[in-house]
Image (tube, coloured by chain):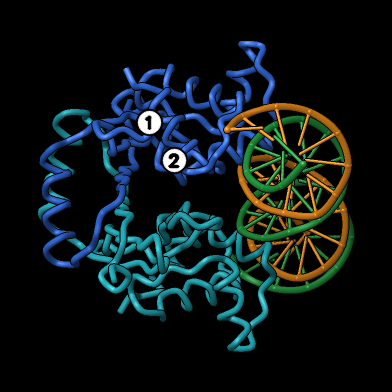
Chain colours: A cyan, B blue, C orange, D green
Amino acid sequence: MIDTGKIFEDLRKKGFRITPQRETILEFLLSIPAGAHLSAEDLKESLEQQNIKISLATLYRTLKFLTAEGLLREIDLGEDHKHYEIMNENQEHFHLICIKCNKTIEFNSEKLVGLTQEIVNNQYNFNVVDYQFKVFGICEDCQS
Amino acid sequence: MIDTGKIFEDLRKKGFRITPQRETILEFLLSIPAGAHLSAEDLKESLEQQNIKISLATLYRTLKFLTAEGLLREIDLGEDHKHYEIMNENQEHFHLICIKCNKTIEFNSEKLVGLTQEIVNNQYNFNVVDYQFKVFGICEDCQS
DNA sequence: TTTCGTGCAAACCATTTGCAGCAGC
DNA sequence: GCTGCTGCAAATGGTTTGCACGAAA
């Protein structure tokens, strides 16, 4: 389990204010299954089901803020809006996206990560912060 | 060099009409350096510099059309609009994106492609159509 | 008390769409 | 001539922003 107290303390040290909205949003995102990725609208809906009301403007601002602070990752799944997920070292960075049913399968591969790091560091002297690999195609279920 | 005659003939056979706009757009995209990726607005600007006027609506419709026909690839570079590039078997699928200067470096790696294919086919029985790998970080020039 | 963060509504901007006229075939 | 394609302008939809108020520190 992740210690939100520590996170908030660090943010406070940086001069940011810890509001109920920021607490609620971060705690909610930590409470859902790892690897789940929600859009701003999804998040608003989920919060409303728990009778929590936060304006869309604040949701967008907070998601952007938490992303800038390295706590969330912004991902694009080929739809017309962005998704966000908790930034986690042990995260899946690989998405299989079915172009028929729009389902996404996530996976990870030490080998792929290692090979990528090797190429990027050695050949391009590039300082990696994050990566996202997307494979588009047709999933097992849709191949009939 | 790619034979546009053949491409247009195929499209005609499928019942699509070959308009000057479609010809112009495809030929323009074929004429720029491989791996270049333009947004709809970029494309409009480039065409206007050659005194070619095509409405934005038509540009968007044509880009979508050519993508659906498998002639272009739609890519997302973390900006607020999509980019398009010629679909090409020998294409770079890997982008290093600098989060400071926004520059993108493209590369390819047989090894990475092979490893990905292997994992995706064997473990997920996933039928690959296209893939895009993005690595975010800080480029050599911005590391000072 | 001093900012910073929030909520509301309006603004923005990339992309899409309805419709009338034009053009490919 | 039929029907699909284009251009224009208006609409759409996700996201951002100006401003006044409320609250964190």
Residues indicated by labels 1 and 2 sit on the same polypeptide chain? yes
Question: Which chain does the numbered disc 2 sit on?
Answer: B
At 35% from the left and 75% from the top, the residue drawn is A3
| Mark 1 or mark 2, earlier in chain | 2
Residue A78, position as x, y percentages in the image? 46, 54
Q: Residues within 10 Å of mark 2 (few under 14, many from 20)?
A: some
- For the residues bearing labels 1 and 2, Cβ distance under 8 angstroms: yes
Q: Number of numbered discs present?
A: 2
At 69% from the left and 20% from the top, the residue drawn is B53
Q: Is residue C23 above or below residue B58?
A: above
- Horizontal arrangement in the rendering, residue B50 relative to residue B128 (left or right): right
Q: Mark 1 and mark 2: span between their CA atoms?
A: 8 Å
Q: Is residue A107 above or below residue D18?
A: below
Residue A114, position as x, y percentages in the image? 12, 49
Q: Which residue is mark 1?
A: B104
Residue B37, position as x, y percentages in the image? 44, 30
Toward the viewer: D13 or A8?
D13
Q: Quadrant of the N terminus of chain A?
A: bottom left
User: Can you tell which quarter of the image residue A123 is in?
Assistant: top left
Question: Which chain does the numbered disc 1 sit on?
Answer: B
Toward the viewer: A19 or A134?
A134
Q: Which residue is mark 2?
A: B77
User: Can you tell which quarter of the image residue A71 is in?
Assistant: bottom left
Residue A137, position as x, y percentages in the image? 31, 57
Q: Which mark is residue B57?
A: none
* Amino acid type shown at disc 2: Leu
Toward the viewer: C12 or B37?
B37
Secondary structure beneath dot 2 equals loop
